[in-house]
Structures are given as structure tokens and as C-alpha cells.
Amino acid sequence: MASILDRVPLPTRGRRNRVQTPQSVPPPQTQEDFVEMTLQEHLEELRSRILKSAVAILLALVVGLWLAFPVMNTIREQANVSGLQAISPTEPFTVYMRVALYIAIAIAMPVLIYQLMGFISPGLTASERRYVIIAIPFVMVSFAAGVAFAFFLLVPRALSFLSQFGSGVFEWNPRASEVLSFYLTLMLGVGLIFELPVLMYATTLIGVTTPKLFGKFRKYAFLLAMIVSAIITPTPDPFNMMLVALPTYLLYEVGILLSRIARRGKMTQEA
């Protein structure tokens, strides 16, 4: 019997062993590989992430309190007044704390987004998680660019027009809280407008829209940009309207280009 086994070629026995114990095939995933959390565990994790976000905002608030007065002084200069008006006794302190808090939230935003992603990522697939991680930097940069555009260019031009409108009849002495709300509204609105290319790219990537569809609406894009600029800008002068309408239309063209890139990449993956 031993002599018969000795006559079997070694390569044949080696092939038989490789078939019996494959090394390249990973074990199949089962339901035991996925850990389900109870409602209590979800609430505990949510509480922990909210607490970490609050701590990040409080730490950033220290910087916000330091930068609040320089920012308010810049706002005062852009409003073209020697001093912003305060009606109530607590208004100076309230406006100061609002500015400091907005600065703190802006500084802590990466931490807030990280905590949010940590909470929702277990419910996403691997491909969805990858797309979200790629999109987050572009969303943040686009929004920050819109906020900067509004703060340094759009709002000063709007305030310059408003301060000179009816100067022979009205005395320009704006209230501090209203000027701050004016800034916040325009910065949020323009920041969202700057998200247009990212939105067009994302909707093409998931198959909701196509570059051809965006191209068909190109002739209406400038008209819609004018309507949006008329809603956002509080001044009726053509210069300030075009200051928003032209970038909005250019962002639409950039969105069409990104949509084509997304479509090309999607077709490559499907092939």
C-alpha cells in the first residue's frame, strides 16, 4: 500500500490539497458579522456625539470671543457708520455673543461634521460612505467660498447702496441686531447658491439627472439666476443684482461640466 502511494506524482497530490484548502477565497459573511444596536445604544451614542460637539463649540467659543469685536468693527465700517445703534440695554452684549457663537460654530464645523458622519455611517453602504466622504470637503469649500463672497463683496456693496438711498430724507443709523441678521441672511443664501455645482454632480452620480437635461435648461438658467438674485439681494440696483446673477449662472455652467464628469465616471463603472 505504501508503495502505491509513493508512485503518485507530487504535483497531483499538491493540486488535490489546494482544492481541499483554498487560501484565496474569503469566508462568506453572515448575519453574525453585522452588529445591530438597540434603541438605548443608539440614544447613548447620540448623546455622546452631541456632548462632544458641544464641547468643541465651547472650546471654539474662546476664539470666537476674541475675534468678535474685530469682526463687529469690520461690519461697522462696511455699514458706513461711526457706530451701530443699540436700542435695548442688553443689545450690545447680545449681538457680541451672537457674533462669537457664529464664529465658534464655523471653527468647530469639521468636528460637528465628523460626529455626524460617525453617527450615520453605520447605516450606509460602503459605496454610499465613500461618496459622502468625497463630497464633504467640496461641500464645505463651496459653502465657505459663498460666505466669503457675500461678506467681503456683496454685503458691503448692498450696504453702500442702502446707506445712500434717500439720504436727503432718511438718517442712516442702522440697528446692530438688524445689521447682523442682514449679514447672516445674505451669507447663508449665497453659501447655499455656491453648493449648486456639488448638487448637480451628486444628482447625476445617483442617476436622478443627466448632463443633457441640464443642457436643455441652459437657456432658462440665466433668467432663474436673475430671479434668485432679485430675491436674495435687498437692493433694486442692477449692479448688485448682476453681482449675484453672474456668479450663479457661472456656477450652473460649472455644474454642467461636473455633471458630464460624473456621467462619464458612472458609465465607466457600469462597463
Image (cartoon, grey):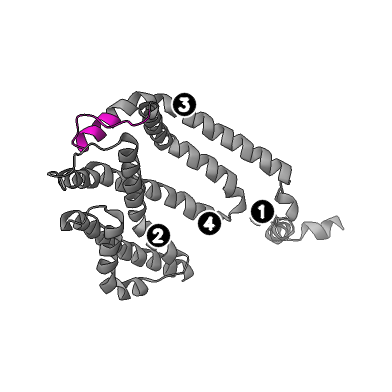
| Amino acid type, label 2 | Leu
In this rendering, position of residue 172 left or right of residue 192: left
Using the image as rendered, state which of residue 265 and residue 16 is in the foreground: 265
| Amino acid type, label 4 | Glu
Q: Position of residue 109 (x, y in %)?
A: 44, 39
Circles 3 and 4: CB atoms closer than 8 Å:
no
Residue under pointer 3: 59
| Amino acid type, label 3 | Leu
For the residue carrying disc 2, how many other residues have a C-alpha within 10 Å: few (<14), some (14-19), or many (20+)?
A: some
Identify the residue at the far front of this view: 169
Using the image as rendered, state which of residue 68 and residue 21 is in the foreground: 68
Residue occupying image coordinates x 23% and y 41%: 152
Residue under pointer 1: 23
For the residue carrying disc 1, how many other residues have a C-alpha within 10 Å: few (<14), some (14-19), or many (20+)?
A: few
Q: Identify the magenta region.
A: 71-88
In this rendering, position of residue 238 left or right of residue 127: left
Q: Position of residue 42 (x, y in %)?
A: 67, 43
Work out whether residue 142 can be spotted.
no
Of circles 1 and 2, the one toward us is 2
Of circles 2 and 3, the one toward us is 3
Q: Position of residue 141 (x, y in %)?
A: 35, 46
